Amino acid sequence: MTKPAFLDSLDAQLDWQREFYKDLHRNPELSLEEHRTKERITAELTDLGLEPQGISDTGLVAVIENGHGPTVLARADIDALPVTEDTGLDYASEVDGVMHACGHDMHAAALLGAVRLLNENRDAWSGTYIALFQPAEENAAGAKAMIDDGLTSKIPTPDVALAQHVMPMPVGKIFTAAGPVMSAGDSVKITVFGRGAHGSMPHLSVDPVVIAASIVLRLQTIVSRETDPGEFAVVTVGASNAGSKSNIIPDRAELLLNVRTYDTAVRERVIASIERIVRGECESAGAPKEPTFEYFDQFPLTDNSEAVNDTVTEALTEFFGTETVQEATPATASEDFSELPSAFGIPYSYWFVGSFDAEKYQAAEEAGTVLTDVPANHSPFFAPELDPTLEIATKAQVIGAFAYLGG
């Protein structure tokens, strides 16, 4: 791959990108409420002479058609989280209880920067570049909303899709890998039913609190006793809710579960085990009604194409060097990005960009310890180092696309 010489001009636009990033960070918006964010991105794209197209209520795309060649789709998510910021940044969130605690503002700023560079240097590449700004990644609704609004018929069919995510990893590093890099995720609300009674008359009840407690304990055996030790699975009970008073046995209890897996067969087996255990405990307790299961916030597996990952990794390594580009360890978090390439039936690659104090990571590595004091995504203290993260993320977007468009 010929290195794009125009990346030398990135310094001239970084101040613009930094201000855009800070503006998004000060003004975060929750999933499916990203109206101001959409307007800001639309204004910037329009100023570049492009014609952004709204797809779904708060999503948008910009298409740069530049002669014959491959078509590359690059995606950035744009929504924030219901988190109260505690970073102390001078550009901290000005919206009560809402924060860009996952780095999506960085993703949007980096993709917008890549769009500007490619748009202003069309003589250096050939093909079609599609910049997609996706809402509602945090609740797994945004990609589906854009697809349901006719995404696949409103833009050219891409040959490949690319995306990246800032992570609590050493700043200045990029991490790539073929195969699963983000887990599939499923949340489920389970309601178990009992028979309510006075707290002093437990013999007249079927106590759903006891049923729920038994279920919580039995669920722990799905990973420890039903899953092959070489396979990955997580089953977390995040909430258990029942009753409102000490002397009242309620008539129902609710459990909120979260499941993470890297394999479709494992996912199906884990979900089947959850339902089997819940039904079994209810039956053994004499519950008067069948339990109910409500699945929500379901994220697909992010499973990188080996061919696309190899192409992108080779290009990134050639540009940044082997010290910068390293092998990624699969993350246990989840994403809905893969819904987009799946809708088109195309391969994809998704990589990580480090964004936190590299010296701390190096010191921990030399000491043989695990670094635990770096705020993870979704933390109220999550604050990626603006420099050089924004510069590296922008260059990574360009290089990933240029691996296909620069030939």
Image: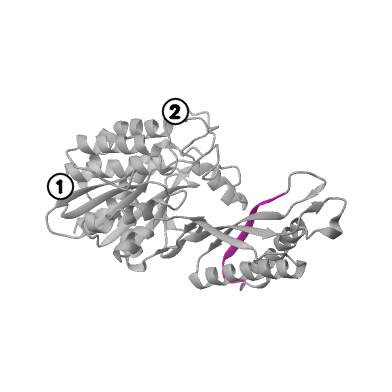
Q: CA distance from mark 2 to mark 1?
A: 34 Å
Q: Nearer the viewer, residue 197 or 34?
A: 197
Q: Is residue 238 magenta?
A: yes
Magenta-highlighted residues: 229-242
**Callout 2: 10 Å neighbours few (<14), some, many (20+)?**
some
So how many labels did they put on this image?
2
Q: Left of 225 or right of it: where is 66?
A: left
Q: Nearer the viewer, residue 208 or 126?
A: 208
Whether residue 54 is visible: yes
Q: Quadrant of residue 246?
A: top right
Q: Nearer the viewer, residue 85 or 212?
A: 212
| Residue 41: percent from left, percent from top | 29, 38
User: Which amino acid does the dot numbered 1 rest on?
Assistant: Arg
Q: Left of 200 or right of it: where is 368?
A: left
Q: Identify which residue is drawn at 34% across, 33% down.
A: 20
User: Which amino acid does the dot numbered 2 rest on?
Assistant: Tyr
Q: Nearer the viewer, residue 279 or 94?
A: 279
**Callout 1: 10 Å neighbours few (<14), some, many (20+)?**
some
Q: Quadrant of residue 304?
A: bottom left
| Residue 385: percent from left, percent from top | 45, 37
Q: Is residue 159 magenta?
A: no
Quadrant of the image for the N terminus? bottom left
Quadrant of the image for the C terminus? bottom left
User: Magenta segment, principal secondary structure?
Assistant: strand
| Residue 136: percent from left, percent from top | 41, 47
Compared to residue 237, the image places residue 12 above or below, namely: above
Compared to residue 54, the image places residue 89 above or below, namely: above
Q: Identify which residue is drawn at 72% across, 59% down.
A: 212
Label 1: element kind:
helix
Tell which residue pokes out farthest to the right in this image.
200
Look at mark 2 in the image and give the residue it sits on: 91
Look at mark 1 in the image and give the residue it sits on: 122
